[in-house]
Image (cartoon, helix red, strand yellow):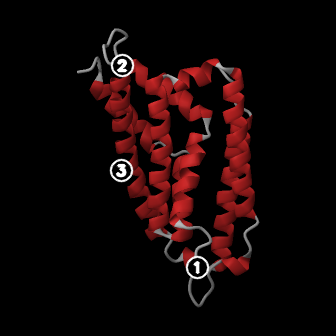
Amino acid sequence: MLGIHDLPLFLVSGLLLNITPGPDTAYIVGRSAQMGWRAGVAAAFGISAGCLVHVFGSAIGLSALLSASATAFAAVKWAGAAYLVYLGLMQIMARRKDLPNEDGPAAPALSMWQVFWQGALTNILNPKVAMFFLAFLPQFVAADAPHQALALLLLGTMFIVNGTIWCLGVAVAAARAARGVRRSSAAVLWLNRAIGGLLVYLGVRIAMLEAR
């Protein structure tokens, strides 16, 4: 079908990659613990949307261009690094008065759309994600397939759908586990700092990436 081969191996590999804990999972867990399951769901859909951008990029050759052009790679890398470090520092510097107290939760500092776009941009501005899809997806499409772009889109969509389902489960589970934590302003303050530290770490990692 469309030159796709070894589909069972692709599905198993994709599942293992999706369930392996990583920065995306940490971001979803952090937002769920901090703001509840709706924020976790928004984060999960944002991350999936960011991955979808890279799948389209792989299908139409943009990822190959990013891989081949040192200038394009550097531009995306530094934009992504600066954005993540900025977000991380904003989280770290969150003040206690903006957080919930014993009388009940304060209004969330972020809207669900902001959580979504943070998750999306975290992946969109990460050239490492582009390189992953560029390296992973073509392994399951025949070199002489007549519709390679369509095959890559199909495989990428399958990968993202499976990953989204997993991430939604993680979001709900994390929110339930942290229900009591969200009532404590001190706990939420440290969650903010943990999420901020994660974002700064990701930004530094992206800044250190080298084009292959």
Residue where numbered disc 2 is placed: 148
The residues tagged by marks 1 and 2 sit, at their Cα atoms, a distance apart of 48 Å
Which three-letter amino acid code belongs to the residue tagged 1?
A: Ala
Question: Of callouts 1 and 2, which one flags the residue occurring earlier in the amino acid sequence?
Answer: 1
* SS at mark 3 in the image: helix
The residues tagged by marks 3 and 1 sit, at their Cα atoms, a distance apart of 28 Å
* SS at mark 1 in the image: loop
Nearer to me, 9 or 75: 75
Residue 182 picture location, percent across and down? 56, 75
Is there any visible trace of residue 26 in the rendered image?
no
Q: Judge the density around disc 3: few (<14), some (14-19), many (≥20) Cα neighbours within 10 Å.
A: few
Instruction: Give the label, 3 or 1, closer to the camera.
Output: 1
Q: Judge the density around disc 2: few (<14), some (14-19), many (≥20) Cα neighbours within 10 Å.
A: some
Is the Cβ of the residue at disc 3 closer than 8 Å to that at disc 1? no
* SS at mark 2 in the image: helix
Tell me the quarter of the image containing the C terminus. top right
Residue where numbered disc 3 is placed: 165
- Residue 35: give its label: none
Residue 142 picture location, percent across and down? 34, 13
Residue where numbered disc 1 is placed: 107
Q: Is residue 132 above or below residue 190?
A: above
The residues tagged by marks 2 and 3 sit, at their Cα atoms, a distance apart of 26 Å
Which three-letter amino acid code belongs to the residue tagged 2?
A: Gln
